[in-house]
Image: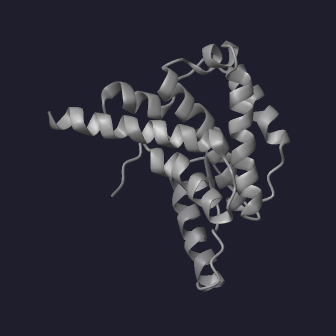
Amino acid sequence: MIKHTKSEHTQIGLFPNPKLDQKLEQARLDSFLGLLKAGGTPFDVEENMQIKRWEKVVWNAAWNSITSLTLLDTHSWLKSEGGMALTRQLMTEVIDVAQKCDVKLSYDLIDELIDKILKLPGIHSSMHADRVAGRQMEVEIILGTPVKKAREFGMKVPVIETLYHLLSGLNIHMSQVAKA
């Protein structure tokens, strides 16, 4: 039995895999959707999960990495000298990688995500919370994929790589502190 005490709006869909029986995968999704409905969890079934996945990577790569490194909230960062330009470059690099992976993201997403964050109060990310608490941060999950894909394609993504290395270094530091 699973007791879920907080319902968040969930985006869900199938992740295409030619090695799997699509009818079986659809049946599994339908079964899970039935559980979500019965539990009162709001959800959207997304036609293309790759697009949603990479949109989330653009969001997380920016706000998680920046708030963790600077310890600033999103608004303070964007108002800082160079903050907006660096954020836009970072988001552009992630979209470049997504497009190379045949995921059709538009560069308009950058303005959408910046507008979205500016409508919220200045926030810190979950990665920031991990850093402040001295826990390992989700560097590989959030930045590792775009870095690895960029390397596979021979792409230059200097902002993503710099943030990846800095945050990986912080993880090493926190690991050493935890052992001491």
Residue 126, percent from left and from top: 46, 33
Most foreground residue, 63 or 160: 160
Residue at 66% over, 47% down: 157
Establish if 69 lies above or below 96.
above
**Which residue of the protein is positioned furthest toward the left in this rendering?**
180
Image-quadrant location for residue 161: top right
Residue 150, percent from left and from top: 64, 57
Most foreground residue, 142 or 36: 142
Establish if 55 lies above or below 150.
above
How many circles with numbers are drawn on the protein?
A: 0
Residue 21 lies left or right of residue 3; in this view the side is: right
Residue at 39% over, 38% down: 169
Residue at 37% over, 48% down: 3
Establish if 48 lies above or below 73.
below
Check the picture and name the quadrant holding the N terminus. Answer: bottom left
Do we see residue 47 in this rendering?
no
Residue 155, percent from left and from top: 69, 56
Residue 114 lies left or right of residue 67; in this view the side is: right
Image-quadrant location for residue 15: bottom right
Residue at 65% over, 63% down: 13
Check the picture and name the quadrant holding the C terminus. Answer: top left
Do we see residue 65 in this rendering?
yes
Most foreground residue, 157 or 80: 157
Residue 168, percent from left and from top: 42, 42
Establish if 75 lies above or below 27.
above
Indicate how the structure is coloured in the image.
Answer: one colour
